[in-house]
Amino acid sequence: MVTLWGNYEGISQYKAPIVIGTQAISGVTVGKYIALFKGQKTVMVTYNIMGKDALNKAAVMNSIKNIQIGNAASLSEKIALLPFTFEPETPFKVADVMGNSTVSLTTFDGMDKSGEKPLLIIASSISQSRIPDQSKHAKTLLKSIKGFEDHKIISEDKVSFVGKDGYRTVAKTSNQAVIQYIGTLDNGYYIRLISMGSPEEIEKVTKTVDTIAKSVTPKK
């Protein structure tokens, strides 16, 4: 444990647990320091130290003592950092934003272990891609969805998405259905929208999913 000073959620000083050890990676011994900070959300800070001339323990501990944890960003602040805008439509509501690139919308509160209730995800790729054949790329992306390794294509069409020539695919398994949109931007990144749920539930929200897809606009 290390005592950290400074104002942290109204506490002038507090103790943060720190784990110190080593890990063998590809034949190289890496020193590891892991510190946990409590707050609105727990924050884990990891140091990987390689080489004898790298940071020593005193330097690492001093660095940890100087860490200041701010308040967790609000949902609206996270949405503002996305590289695209969109308009939610009932029954979908924003549930979470991940990595400044992905937003999830659900039709339920909490978790749906059954996987039957529709959810919708809009995501921007984190790297540039060359996609000469959107149909082929769409099928590859579908297979990457858990449970859709084997699926049946119900329909596929060229559509307008994110202001570009996009591709819309509907696929099913024995107990799941998915609607997928992909659109490639001029900068080489692509935006993808998928909505999943039971075939019966997805059929009920298909028009809503299409409406949300039309609202997705990349930021300039």
Image (spheres, rainbow, N blue to C red):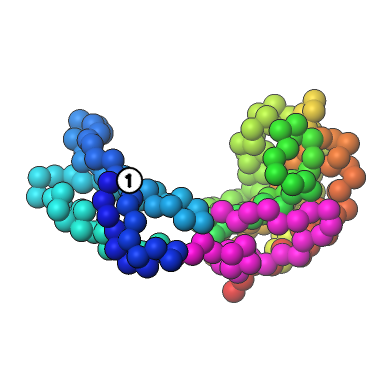
Q: Judge by depth and name the residue closer to the eye, 9 or 136.
A: 9
Q: Judge by depth and name the residue closer to the eye, 110 or 97.
A: 110
Span shown in magenta? 70-98
Residue that extends furthest to the bottom in the rendered view of this protein: 220
| Residue 27 figure quarter | top left
Three-letter amino acid code at disc 1? Pro
| Vertical order, 184 against 108 (above or below) | below
In this image, 65 relative to 157: left or right? left
Identify the residue at image location x=60%, y=51%: 132
Identify the residue at image location x=86%, y=48%: 205
Q: Which residue is mark 1?
A: 17
Q: Can residue 177 be seen by looking at this rendering?
A: no
Identify the residue at image location x=59%, y=64%: 74
Residue 37 percent location from the top left of the image: 39, 52
Residue 73 percent location from the top left of the image: 54, 64
- The quadrant the C terminus occupies is bottom right
Q: Which SS class for mark 1?
A: loop
Q: Judge by depth and name the residue closer to the eye, 43 or 165.
A: 43
| Vertical order, 145 against 213 (above or below) | above
In this image, 36 relative to 219: left or right? left
